[in-house]
Image (cartoon, rainbow, N blue to C red):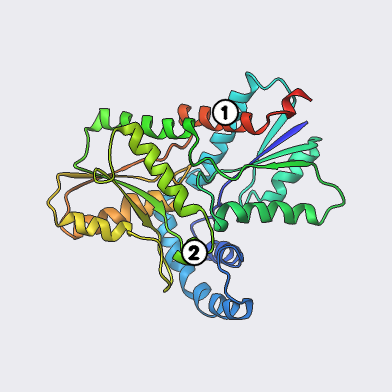
Amino acid sequence: MIGVLLSNLGSPEGPTEKALRHYLAEFLWDRRVTDLPRWKWWLILHGIILRTRPARSAKLYQRIWSDEGSPLLITTREQAAGIDKALGKSLGVSYAIAVGMRYGNPSIESALDELMGKGCDRLLVLPLYPQFSSATTASTFDAVADVFRKRKHHPEIRFLSGYHDDPGYLDALAGSIRDYWDREGEPDRFLISFHGMPVRTKECGDPYFEQCLTTAKGLRDRLGMDEKSAFLAFQSQFGNEEWLSPKTDKTLQAWARENLGRVDVVCPGFSSDCLETLEEIAMTNREIYRKAGGGDYRFIPCLNASAAHIDALAAIVRKGLAGWLDR
C-alpha cells in the first residue's frame, strides 16, 4: 500500500502568547532555521526571543485566525482531500494520504504513524514548498528521517524536493492571476514576492534564490510580461545579517512615491495562504504602501485548494509514484 505525506510549515495551537512560545521554541531551535552554535543560540532564544516575540506574534495571528482555526492547516487539509479525490479517479492502487506539519500539530510523526498503521510499505513525501530551501524542504527531510531513525523498519521512501518549474503549477498560478484581473482589472505595477532568506544560504549552495527566479520567469512568460512590469522581491526579513534583495517593503515604499494607480502583489512561493500572506502582505505591507503615499493595493490570494492547484498537485504526486503504480 502506498502512503502519501503532505507537509507544510505548521501553525501554533492557537493565537495566544503561550501557544506561540511553544511553537516558536520548536521552530527556531531547528538547526536548518538557525545554525548558530547551539550554546550561543540557546542563550539568545531563551534569554531574549522567547521572552518578547510570542506576545507580538500572537497579535499577528489573531488578525488572521478563523473560527475553524489556522488558515494554513485548514487549507492543507482541504488540499489533501482534493488530491485524494483526484487520485482516486485514476491511480488504480491502494493508497492513503495524511497531513503532517513540520512544526506543531498534526506532526510529521503522527502522520507517519497514521500511514504505517494502515499498512503502507511505500511512502511518497511531498513538502508543499514549490521552491527548495534548506530551511523548509530539507528540514522536512530531516524530520522524516528522524522518525524512522528511531525505528527498526521503514518503508521504501521517495521524497519530492520541489516543483518550482512544474508546468501545471505555473499554469495554475498564471490562470489564477488572469482570473483575478478579469474580475478586478489589471494593475499599474505587479509585484512577485517570495519569502526571504539570508544571502549566505545562497552563497553556501542553497538553490532557493535561483528557483525563485525560474518560477518568476515562468510566470512572466505565461502572463506575457517582462521584469519591469512584473517585479520580483523578497519579504519576511528578520535579524541583523544581509538577506536576499530587493526587499518587498522597500520596493513598495519606492513605488508609493511614483503615484501609481494600483499595485497588485502575489506570493507564488506559498502553496496556502498563511501568516506571511494574509497578515504580512495583505495587511502590513498594504499599510506600509499607503503610509508611504501609495494608493490602491491588492493582494492576489495563493492557489490554496483551487481546482487548478489540486489538479497540478495530484499530477505531481502521480509522477512521483511512477513505477510504483505497476507493482
Q: Residue furthest right?
A: 152
Q: Residue furthest left?
A: 259
Res 43 visible: yes
User: Which quarter shows the N terminus?
Assistant: top right
Find numbered disc 2 in the image and state the secondary structure of the residue it sits on.
helix
Query: Is any part of residue 13 visible from this angle?
Result: no
Residue 261 badge: none
The type of residue carrying mark 1 is: Ala
Image location of residue 144, percent across then percent down: 70, 51
Q: Position of residue 49 (x, y in %)?
A: 50, 74
The residue beneath circle 1 is 315
For this view, does 86 lie left or right of residue 183?
right
Which secondary structure, mark 1?
helix
Disc tally is 2
Residue at left 80%, top 37%?
Answer: 121
Position of 315 with respect to 170 (left or right) is: right
Say if 130 sits above or below 290 in the image.
above
Q: CA distance from mark 2 to mark 1?
A: 33 Å
Find residue 311 and report its horizontal and vertical position in percent.
52, 27
Residue 250, above or below 36: above
Tell me which residue sits at (75%, 23%) in the image. Answer: 326
